[in-house]
Image: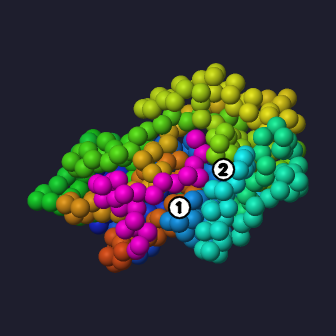
């Protein structure tokens, strides 16, 4: 048997930030929830991410979800009863040329129309925000900056959600592998696992880079592709900057953590799809050279660790959320294209409202899987890597 229970109102496949946040939101609405995770919580993309929280996007839905998520993040330690390590040092996004500037101006106008505090900076203002940057070395003509963007600890945040959900009655089945999605006459009826069957009239696919396989178990095709990504972290040093620095052109991002380490990543020279976990020296060389170009003062600090993870990438770099036509009760929560951690708080609330109360939203409608049927999609341009 699967253990404590054999039936739930909602079965969530995946114990990352989205699965655990949704378990919390559902359980506090009175639903009986079971989360099934094949390894430990945060063992997928969540525990391998850069931990940034950004509101600067080109797609209106992502800006809205991110702004609402930041409002939640600001109160989340208090709400969950545990410190999630949230701080707001801002995001500084490099602008490299006139083409970048036109896109930045378009983005900022839309973001401001939604109420976001964001500005376009001159080269001098860039170094006022992050003094260690070499604007000439970055090959930048400026940047955009939002001071309320920030960072949270992905482990602390996910486990805080999970523990709060447990206190509200949610069940978590770690080291339990889903082997099939059970269906009957156009509706899901539960999940089959290597520890037994779990009956549930609602099943949520929050499996991240493995969401395509979970969807296929139910006969549903999703267009997601897993991309291998790599990250480094350095030795500790005195604090020299607060903002997350990123470039959509170069693909680099880096920030200084609370304990003094610099953490960051960049797309490896070789694009790799699939489930490959081996770190590469070519990435390390590329990351080190680009980081030193952006911030020469960091040239001589030591890298102490390097690891890999996955982006669950959709054709438009926007998530797939909500129900699937033709299969009642099968809810999608994936395809975040590397940005699931920062959007999770509000996504969880929207999906919980949909599942418990049947409350739809324009955002869920626009991010439904059905948008790919005729590929009438809006591309998210503000993507790193």
On screen, residue 172 versus residue 300, left or right, reads left
Element type at marker 2? helix
> At which x and y percent is residue 140?
77, 45
Name, please, the residue furthest toward the front.
98
- Graded by Cα atoms within 10 Å as few (under 14), some (14 to 19) or many (20 or more), the crowding at tag 2 reads few
The disc placed on residue 39 is none
The residue at 84%/52% (across/down) is 123
- Give the mark nearer the N terminus: 2 vs 1: 1
Name, please, the residue furthest toward the left.
185
The residue at 75%/54% (across/down) is 143
**Residue 378 versus residue 23: which sits nearer the camera?**
378
Name, please, the residue furthest toward the top.
281
Q: Is residue 375 magenta?
A: yes
The residue at 47%/64% (across/down) is 347
> At which x and y percent is residue 68?
57, 70
- Graded by Cα atoms within 10 Å as few (under 14), some (14 to 19) or many (20 or more), the crowding at tag 1 reads some
Question: What residue is disc 1 on?
Answer: 59
Q: Which residues are magenta?
A: 361-385
């Amino acid at each position: 048997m699967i253990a404590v229970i054999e039936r739930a109102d909602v079965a969530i496949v995946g114990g990352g930030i989205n699965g655990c946040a949704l378990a919390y939101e559902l359980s506090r609405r009175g639903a009986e929830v079971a989360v099934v995770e094949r390894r430990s919580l945060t063992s997928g993309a969540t525990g391998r991410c850069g931990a940034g929280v950004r509101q600067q996007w080109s797609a209106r839905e992502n800006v809205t979800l991110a702004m609402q998520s930041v409002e939640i993040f600001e109160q989340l330690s208090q709400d969950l009863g545990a410190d999630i390590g949230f701080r707001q040092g801002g995001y500084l996004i490099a602008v490299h040329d006139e083409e970048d500037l036109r896109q930045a101006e378009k983005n900022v106008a839309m973001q401001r129309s939604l109420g976001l505090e964001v500005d376009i900076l001159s080269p001098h203002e860039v170094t006022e925000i992050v003094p260690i940057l070499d604007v000439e070395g970055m090959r930048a003509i400026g940047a955009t900056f939002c001071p309320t963007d920030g960072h949270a600890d992905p482990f602390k945040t996910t486990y805080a959600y999970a523990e709060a959900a447990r206190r509200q009655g949610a069940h978590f089945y770690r080291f339990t592998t889903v082997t099939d999605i059970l269906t009957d006459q156009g509706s899901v009826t539960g999940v089959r696992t290597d520890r037994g069957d779990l009956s549930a009239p609602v099943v949520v696919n929050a499996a991240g880079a493995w969401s395509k396989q979970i969807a296929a178990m139910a006969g549903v095709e999703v267009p997601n592709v897993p991309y291998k990504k790599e990250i480094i972290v350095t030795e500790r040093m005195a604090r020299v900057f607060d903002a997350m620095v990123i470039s959509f052109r170069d693909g680099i991002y880096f920030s200084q953590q609370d304990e003094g380490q610099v953490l960051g990543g960049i797309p490896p020279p070789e694009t790799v799809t699939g489930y490959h976990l081996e770190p590469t020296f070519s990435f390390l060389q590329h990351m080190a050279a680009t980081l030193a170009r952006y911030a020469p003062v960091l040239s001589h600090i030591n890298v102490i660790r390097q690891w890999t993870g996955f982006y669950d990438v959709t054709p438009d770099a926007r998530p797939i959320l909500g129900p699937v036509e033709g299969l009642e009760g099968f809810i999608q929560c994936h395809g975040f294209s590397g940005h699931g951690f920062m959007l999770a708080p509000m996504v969880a609330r929207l999906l919980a409202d949909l599942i418990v109360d049947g409350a739809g939203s324009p955002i869920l409608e626009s991010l439904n899987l059905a948008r790919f049927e005729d590929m009438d999609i809006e591309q998210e341009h503000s993507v790193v890597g």
